[in-house]
Structures are given as structure tokens and as C-alpha cells.
Image: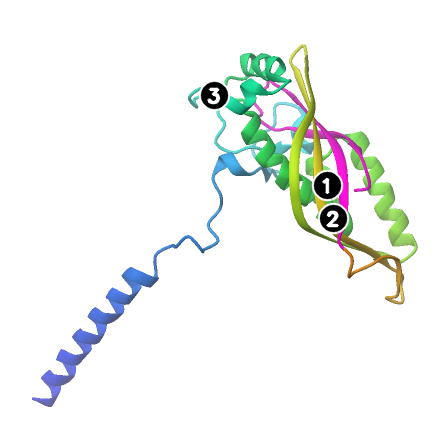
Amino acid sequence: MQFFDIIFFAAIAAFLVFRLWSVLGRRSGLDRRPPSSSSFWTLRDREDAAAPTKREDKVVHLPGRGPESETPARPAAAAQSPFAEAFDAMRKRDRNFSIEEFLAGARVAFETVVSAFAKGDKKTLRALLSKDVFSRFAAAIDARAAKEETLEVMITKISDAEVSDATLAGNIGRIVVRFFSEQIKFTRNKDGAIIEGDPNTVRSITDTWTFERDLRSRNPNWTLVATHGPA
């Protein structure tokens, strides 16, 4: 009898574990699942699937934007923008273009570039920046390293990201974005002493970045071709 009691209670325990897993083991709204393709850009490694041109080495990838996608409806916000005509022209070149999707990705690109610059992460920067912009960022990183200084940056908030200009020249779309952010930013020397900035002060910073893309290309990536501002 004792043997059957053990089997009986083991079966009950297994059932309870299964029930707990079915409730707690599933994903909830608080887990860290990747966001949808409409809310972010992901970096494409240089070794990833064949690039039709060298442009792809220094761009930002928007997943799920292949030619088979359905053409999205024109958002009301885009229609009311002073750059609506430019957005319409871009959409004629690329029917999957969405300014809302672009701006969502631009926010992530902004945080990624600022963080990579502070860390001296050239590999990440090379994947996101044009050749000229990368050269300037890399030179600044090298100069900082030569002095044995470290830059620490924390973006506490991106208050807004708004389009300040949008143009289409041939097939090349160009969108200028103004980022309004709050950052903690300071520099330490080789001894760890703070020589610039304040770790206890949040600064309001405005940066203007320009993104560019060949809208006829099957590559859906945008590249950062110009920056203006403290970042």
C-alpha cells in the first residue's frame, strides 16, 4: 500500500507543477520579449546575408519590411505634417515607408549611438554611421583613449523626436530628426576623478541628426549621415 501511496502523491505533485507552469511559465506583459518590427531598428552584423551594395555595412535594419509586405494606410499624423508631400514621395519609391515606424527606430538608434560612442564601441558605430560620420566619431574615441579618459553617459529620457526636414532627391530619401533628451554626462581622467560634467546633474540636450536611404534599394536600412549637437 505504501508504494501505491507514493505513486498517488507523486502524480498529484506532477499535476500541480504542470498547472503552475501553465500559469507562471507563459510570457506576461512584463517579460523581455523583443518588440515588434514597427517599434525598433536592429543592427545588422557585417557578416550577415549578402548586401547588394557597400551601403549595407553602415546602416540600420528595419525587420519585417520586405517587398511582400502590404502597403500601410497613410497615418493622419503624416498627412498633417509640413513634410507630408515628401513622405508621400518617399512612399511612392517604397510603399512600405512609414514615418511613425521610422521615428520609433530613430529613437533606438539615437540611444544606441550615444551609448556606443561613450563606450568606445567602434563595431556598433560602424554598422550605424556613414563613413564620414564614423571617421569623426572614431577620431574622438581615439583621442579620449590617448588621454586615458572615460566618458559616461546615461539617457534618462527622450522627451521627443521630431522631423525638422525631409527631402527626396532622385531615389535618396533624407530625413532630419531633432531629438530632445535628458542626459547625465561626465568624463573621468585616468585616476577616476571627474574632470567634466556632473554625475548628479540631468541636462536637457537637443541633437539634430540626419538619416539617409536609397528608397529603391531592396535594403530597408537607413544610415546616419550627419550629426549636429552635443552628442
- CA neighbours of label 2 inside 10 A, class few (<14), some (14 to 19), many (20+): some
Q: Residue furthest top?
A: 170
Q: Residue furthest bottom?
A: 2
Marks 3 and 1, the one that precedes in the sequence: 3
Question: In the image, residue 163 lies at what x, y percent?
Answer: 66, 27
Question: In the image, residue 23 lies at what x, y percent?
Answer: 30, 61
What kind of element bears circle 3? Answer: loop
Marks 3 and 2, the one that precedes in the sequence: 3
- CA neighbours of label 3 inside 10 A, class few (<14), some (14 to 19), many (20+): few
Image point 73% across, 45% down: which residue?
114
Question: In the image, residue 39 lies at what x, y percent?
Answer: 52, 38
Residue marked by disc 2: 121
Q: Residue furthest right?
A: 147
Quarter of the image with the N terminus in it: bottom left
Query: Cα distance, mark 3 to mark 1?
Result: 27 Å
Decide if residue 3 is in sight here. yes
What kind of element bears circle 1? Answer: helix
Question: In the image, residue 6 lies at what x, y percent?
Answer: 16, 84
Query: Cα distance, mark 2 to mark 1?
Result: 7 Å
134 vs 84, nearest the viewer:
84
64 vs 77, nearest the viewer:
77
Q: Which mark is residue 125?
A: 1
Residue marked by disc 3: 67
Q: Residue furthest front?
A: 80
Q: Amino acid at mark 2?
A: Asp
What kind of element bears circle 2? Answer: loop
Q: Which residues are magenta?
A: 202-231
Q: Amino acid at mark 3?
A: Pro
- CA neighbours of label 1 inside 10 A, class few (<14), some (14 to 19), many (20+): many
Question: Contact, CB < 8 Å: mark 2 with mark 1?
Answer: yes
80 on left or right of 162: left
- The question of residue 140 being in magenta is answered with no
